[in-house]
Image (spheres, rainbow, N blue to C red):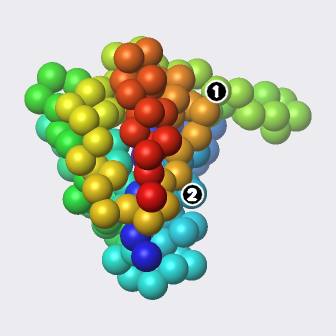
Amino acid sequence: MKVVCAGEAMIEISIDAPGRQVGFAGDTFNTAVYMARALPPGTVDYATVVGEDVLSDRMLSFFEAQGVGTGPIWRHPERLPGIYAITLDEQGERSFSYWRDHSAARMLFTDGFAALEGADLVYFSGITLAILPPLVRTALIAFLAGFP
């Protein structure tokens, strides 16, 4: 079985955490991590687009350390990963700020669906669909309609 999770992993900045922690997360990526933990090694890949910068390098290393395959990931020469910051109010309620309008992941599938080849299962979220350009979103839905 081969699973491909597709979407946007982002740089996470925890403003109020000790040392102002930086990590990597996202709805579809988090799903890929938990699937990789539950399934045999080499079963789960992540399809996204990242930059060619140092944080993208670290992001890819983190993906691999979590057991998530990076084969379907494309590196965009001019775009960077999206970023979000988490802050806490006095009651501990989390609040999020996003910088993702021009993230590399918005280029996902703009060159076709080769990243999904060989997959038995494709996982994506509403957020995945929301970040895609409308024509790419429509093409993805049409592609998946003919999926085995």
- Residue 142 location, x and y as percent? 44, 33
- Residue located 58% across and 40% down the image: 125
Tell which residue pokes out farthest to the bottom in this image. 40
Q: Nearer the viewer, residue 14 or 132?
A: 132
Q: Tell me which corner region of the image, top left, top right, bottom left or bottom right, holds residue 51.
A: top left
Tell which residue pokes out farthest to the left in this image. 77
Q: Secondary structure at mark 1?
A: strand
Q: Amino acid at mark 1?
A: Phe
Quadrant of the image containing the C terminus: bottom left
Residue at which label 2 appears? 31
Q: Nearer the viewer, residue 87 or 134?
A: 134
- Residue located 43% across and 76% down the image: 1
Q: Tell me which corner region of the image, top left, top right, bottom left or bottom right, holds residue 54.
A: top left
Query: Within 10 Å of the Cα at label 1, are there few (<14), some (14-19), or many (20+) other Cα atoms?
Result: few
- Residue 130 location, x and y as percent? 53, 23
Give the answer, above or below, for where 116 lies relative to 142: below
Decide if residue 136 is in sight here: yes
- Residue located 31% across and 63% down the image: 118
Residue at which label 1 appears? 96
Q: Tell me which corner region of the image, top left, top right, bottom left or bottom right, holds residue 46.
A: bottom left
Query: Within 10 Å of the Cα at label 2, are there few (<14), some (14-19), or many (20+) other Cα atoms?
Result: some
Marks 1 and 2, how far apart in space?
20 Å
Decide if residue 82 is in sight here: no
Give the answer, above or below, for where 74 lies relative to 90: below
- Compared across the picture, whether 31 is left or right of 93 comes to left
